[in-house]
Amino acid sequence: MMKKSISLFLLSFFLFSCGQENKKKQMEELIQKQVSLTQTYNHRPAFGAQVTKNGCKLIIEVEGSTDYRFVDNTGQSSMLPLNLLLLNAGKKNVIIKVFPRDGEDYITQHANASVTIYRAADKDTSLKDYQKIAEFNLPQGLEEQKLPYYEAKLVIDVDVPFTYDQELATSINLKNVPNIEQKIVEKYKQLRQLCIEFKEFELHDQLLHEAGKYFNVLYNNTYEEISKNMKKGKMALIDNDSRVIKREFIPLENYTIKYYSNGKIVALWQKNLRPMLYMKVRVKNDEGEERNIEGGRPIFLYMPQGSNALKVW
C-alpha cells in the first residue's frame, strides 16, 4: 500500500536524460549527494493516510509540520505516505480541514470525506498487517449549519526514527525576517523559471534537501534505491514531453502566504487552495486527440541557521 502511494504522489521528482557522458556524471554526483542526506535505520515504521472525498475540498496538516491538499472539485481517493509530514516521534495532532468546492459558499449536502490513518511495523510490511490507528468521517447534516469551513483533529502516536524537528528548531523564524514576502516571491520565481527553461539538474540542486527527506523518511536510503528512483522518475512541472502542444505557468500573483511550524516554514498558495507553482497544459495523444490538463507542485521554504537565503524544505 505504501509503495503504491509513492507512485501516485506528486512528489515524483526527476526527469533526466543520461545519453551523454556529462549528464551521466551529473546524475552520479546528484545520487551521491542524495545518499549523503539519508541514514540507515533498523526501525522503519511506516504511516499512511487513506483519503477519500467528494463534493468538497480537504486538507490534512500535521501540527508543527506541513500539509497534504486534496483541492480539486472532483472526487479523489488516495493512500499517501504520512511519513512525509512527520518530523519526529511522539504524539501528533493531525488536523483535517474541509472546505466547499469552488463556487459554493458553504459545505453542502453533497460533501463527504473520510481519512483513515494506518501504521505498518516496517516499510515492507504486508498490506494485511497494516493497523488502523485513527479515523475521521465528515458528519452528516452540516449543510443546515451553513459552514464555510469545518475542522476536526485526530491524535496519533508515531515512533519514527528520524529527527527533522532538530533542524527546524535552529532555523530562522521567517516572520521576523525583513521583506520576507519579497524574498518568498523571488524564490518561487527562481524555481518557476528553472521549470520553464527545463533546467532539470539546476532544479534538482535546489530540491536536494527536500528530496533527501523524501528518500530518508520512506527508508529508500540505499544507493540502489535512490539511483533507481531518480533515473525512472520525472517531475511533472518540468516535463519536456513531445506530446505537449502548449504549456504555461500561472502568474505569481493573487497568492496567500501560509506559515507552518511556528513560522519556520512557509508556502504560497492560490486563493482556491491549490499550489502557487501551477501549470496548465494542452496535450495530444497518439490518436491525435487533444485535451487540457493542469496541476501544481507544493513548495515549502525555510531558512537554515546561519543563512539569509530561503531554501526548499
Image (cartoon, helix red, strand yellow):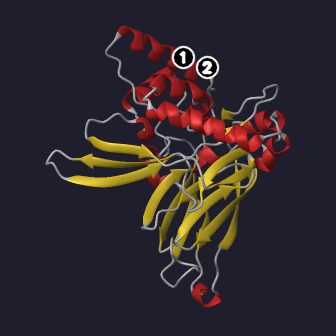
Q: Residues within 10 Å of mark 2 (few under 14, many from 20)?
A: few
Q: Residue reaching furthest left?
A: 287
Residue marked by disc 1: 32
Task: Residue type at mark 2: give it.
Answer: Ser
Image quarter for residue 312? Answer: top right
Q: Where in the figure is residue 267, as x and y percent of width and height?
A: 66, 47
Q: At 37% across and 8% down in the image, what residue appears?
A: 21
Evaluate if marks 2 and 1 touch, with contact meaning CB atoms under 8 Å apart. Answer: yes
Q: At 46% across and 26% down in the image, what residue appears?
A: 199
Q: CA distance from mark 2 to mark 1?
A: 6 Å
Residue marked by disc 2: 36
Q: At 83% across and 33% down in the image, what residue appears?
A: 170
116 versus 175 height, above or below: below
Q: Residues within 10 Å of mark 1 (few under 14, many from 20)?
A: some
Q: Is residue 10 visible?
A: yes
Camera-nearest residue between 20 and 175: 175
Camera-nearest residue between 229 and 278: 278
Task: Residue type at mark 1: give it.
Answer: Gln
Q: Where in the figure is residue 225, as x and y percent of width and height?
A: 46, 27
Q: Residue reaching furthest top?
A: 21
Left or right placement of residue 77 versus residue 163 in this view: left
Q: Quadrant of the C terminus?
A: top right
Q: Is residue 313 visible?
A: no
135 versus 189 height, above or below: below
Image quarter for residue 176? Answer: top right
217 versus 294 height, above or below: above
Q: Where in the figure is residue 119, as x and y percent of width and height?
A: 59, 53
Left or right placement of residue 177 versus residue 164 in this view: right
Q: At 57% across and 85% down in the image, what residue appears?
A: 140
Q: Residue reaching furthest right?
A: 176
Left or right placement of residue 287 versus residue 32 in this view: left
Camera-nearest residue between 289 and 92: 289
